[in-house]
Amino acid sequence: MRSRAILIGAVGMFLALAVARAEDGRVIHWPRIFGVPFPKSNIGFTQVAAGGEHALALKRDGSIKAWGLNTDNVTIITGQCDVPEPNRDWIACAGGSEFSLGLKSDGSVVVWGWFPDPPYGDVVLTPPNSGFVAIAAGYDHALALRASGVVVAWGSNGYGCCDVPSPNSGFVKIAAGFDYSLGLKSDGSIVAWGDNDAGQCDVPEPNRDFVDIAAGSSHSLGLKSDGSIVTWGSNSYGQCDVPLPNTGFASVSAGWCCSAGLKADGSLEIWGYDRSGMCDVPWPNDRFTQVAVGGNSVVALKPAYTAPGDYDGDGTSDLAVFRSGNRLWKVRGFTNVYFGGAGAEPVPADYDGNGVWDLAVNLSSAGVWKIKGQTRVYFGTSSDIPVPADYDGDGSDEMAWFRPSTALWKVRRHHRGYFGRPGDVPVPADYNGDGVDDPAFFRSDPGLWKVWDQTRFYFGNTPDTPIPADYDGDGTADAACYRASTALWSVRGMGSGYFGQPGDVPVPADYDGDGTIEAGFFRASAGLWKVKGFTSVYFGTSADEQVTNP
């Protein structure tokens, strides 16, 4: 019998179903694994999977990204991160110990990495390689589910993990563990086969009303229709001790000696062996849509969209002000905190990519950026305009500035270049919906907008303030202007309208979390906030400046 001690760095057996294309998301991955680096652009993902020491994610365009260990944990390249070409038309992915699986839109299954083919593997994939709708990867065996409800298993057949019990029909979900397999039937019952040395195949009674399954090294999880989780098998690290209250779960996942449950409210519970912090869910613990537990890490999905000014991570923009006189930040209903310094200019953004805006200031006189709880760096001069944004599409905002005297753009640790001319107003945003913020400028006379390497057009004129944002919810930023003298709002291609009164400060943001930007203003003289079609609230004073969307 193979020792399970080797699984500390090598196991990968996780449910990976062919799912309907969900809301595009960004990958959250912890703790860090080494080897092939994480993909640069962290947007547009629809499914995640975790292997022994590697991870995979499926993109909306049908490609698969893989990262992490690409060897046998020593020196031999096994290639589990080398997605075969053509890297397109995938609808699901799964990670094993040192191999990966991909399911194509034509119903065929592709395997790459080190997989026990004959003579090492006892069973080969039964033809035809077509008609599959779901896949699962175990330590060194694989499962695939046909549309007919039949399970096909191949690879190493230790303890009969590839011997699907009769009748082989009526299956709707599959999961693969270390030398054992699970199948969920359409009647809500679970069938288990293979190694049972820790009772991982002894499904507890009553064996009914299950809606999801997961297989670990030698423990199993089943999700009941009432939102509770049932566990069985080895509990050597507490991997079967579901945290209380055991209610409200929507899906389950299992790794080596670690378990995870995704709740219907978007929060995660992770328990068992806390290797390198696997059980420490990154804050904020909400808005998760998927989770997969690997041998030494956890990979999950969150919505890719972060609302401007979302300081508490709830997916909506918060009313927020900064008082430069005493460095006071106030976020309505959330926090009051002092942070900054003499001459501080607020530059809040999501600098760590966790979906929450961070308090940050630019001390321009000293050329210093300070991000609360993260870092302090020298970058830029007193004449530069801070323009933080996500210029590389990795899901986090980068420090950046625009020098109006020379039209020089500089993104910290990335690029620098001249774009525009002196006096232009920088308006970086995602104008083509690719998840990357584009350098752009507005030249008020004669109302010229120009987006780097994309387009140029005329909209607005000298009295206008540019306020680009996604006003129609299509995932791309729209050119827009606000005329302070008349409180006229104009959005290119959508129309114009008056909202507010002369002197109001425009604060377009996503106040209801629907992914569409709403018109709003802050009237500092009265401390009045008003969101068009929603609400009016008094918050702040004439000494404050808005930092919901500065």
Image (spheres, rainbow, N blue to C red):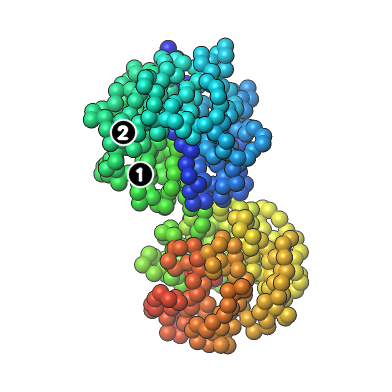
How many angstroms separate mark 2 from mark 1 (CA)?
18 Å
Looking at the image, residue 377 sits to the left or right of residue 217; the answer is right
Would you say 52 lies left or right of 279 here? right
Tell which circle, 2 or 1, labels the residue nearer the N-terminal end: 2
- Local packing at callout 2 (Cα closer than 10 Å; few below 14, some 14-19, many 20+) is some
Residue shown at the point (37%, 48%) measured from the top left: 267
Judge from the rendering whether residue 458 lies leftward or rightward of residue 260; answer left or right: right
Residue where numbered disc 2 is placed: 187
Residue 303 pos. (x, y %) = 48, 53
Locate residue 117, reporting x and y percent: 57, 17
Q: Indicate the quadrant where residue 402 lies.
A: bottom right
Q: Residue at x 56, y 54 (%)?
A: 396
Question: Can you tell which of label 2 and label 1 is closer to the viewer?
Answer: 2
Q: Of helix, strand and loop, which one carries label 1?
A: strand
Which amino acid, mark 1? Ala
Residue picked out by circle 1: 250
Note whether 439 is above or below 303 in the view shown: below
Residue reaching furthest left?
206
